Amino acid sequence: MFAIYKQMWLVNWAEQWQYRANLLMYLAFWLVSPIVYLAVWTTIASAQGNINGLTAPDFVAYYMMLLIVDIATSDITIHIFAYKIMDGSLSNELVLPIHPVLQKVLVNNLAFKALQMLALVPIWLILYVLYQPVFSITAVNVLLAIPAIAFGFLLQFFAGTTITCISFWTTRAWSISDFYSNIFRLMAGQFVPLALLPAFMQTASQLLPFRLALYFPVQLLLGKLSIEETMLNIGLQMVWCVILFMLFRVVWRTGLKKYSAVGA
């Protein structure tokens, strides 16, 4: 099994280098919004002194860390797999001795993510020089953030693959994915830190998995959480990963029965 994943990694890594323009386009997509939010909120916080206790340096540190965690936990399954269901090319992959999603799409996501991280480094360093963020990062937080970010990615991956599998029934899966993404950005703390949301939305975010995929790893790296809070949230991440994985399995198996390979 390891040899299979290794070979798929080598193939996907090589493929990613063939689409450098695509890489830059996606990187710009992920960078523009957080940088805009950073500029807006730091300006407002500087003018008012603070916003709900968050100062301009707090916003700088938050969005600078969010840039890294957002790319590390993001999922692009809808962009690389939905069309295969719609045009019938999935048929070619179903006869292979590997799972089209849990192996091939997963490795494609990781290769894309690794190359994006490399491209992010110089941009992030420039922003660091411009904004001079102050971080309170410890070795313990970094070590705990590794599983937190990994589970955050799995949360987004299983949610993204489940939504992508809706393509078995409708060509509107892209619209559903966009709707989900907008909710995610709001409830995961991408638009603004969750502390700035109305009380009822903060309560709702505690019940939903969105914050676990993005806001929680960011807060952990910033040193805002205790060990008890960290372990509780990692436990919740694991529970939600199992739930979303089981949901994906049900939708995948049901969708395959519906699949008619139109266009193959």
Image (cartoon, helix red, strand yellow):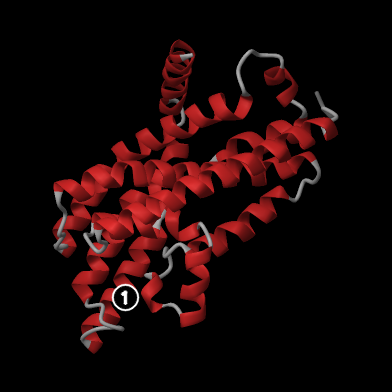
Quarter of the image that includes the C terminus: top right
The kind of residue tagged 1 is Trp
- Provide residue 216's location: percent of width, then percent of height: 36, 58
**Residue displayed at 63% across by 34% down:** 81
* 130 vs 145: above or below: below
Of the pair 80 and 250, the residue shown nearer to us: 250
Q: Secondary structure at mark 1?
A: helix
- Provide residue 89's location: percent of width, then percent of height: 73, 25
- Provide residue 259's location: percent of width, then percent of height: 82, 32
Residue 75 in sight from this viewpoint: no
Q: Is residue 137 left or right of residue 194?
A: left
Residue 222, quarter of picture: bottom left
Q: Which residue is mark 1?
A: 41
**Residue displayed at 14% across by 57% down:** 129
Q: Is residue 250 left or right of residue 126?
A: right
**Residue displayed at 30% across by 83% down:** 52
Tell me the crowding category of disc 1: few under 14, some 14 to 19, or many 20 or more residues within 10 angstroms, Cα based.
many
* 62 vs 239: above or below: below
Residue 244, quarter of picture: top right
Residue 111 in sight from this viewpoint: yes
**Residue displayed at 78% across by 39% down:** 168
**How many numbered circles are shown?**
1
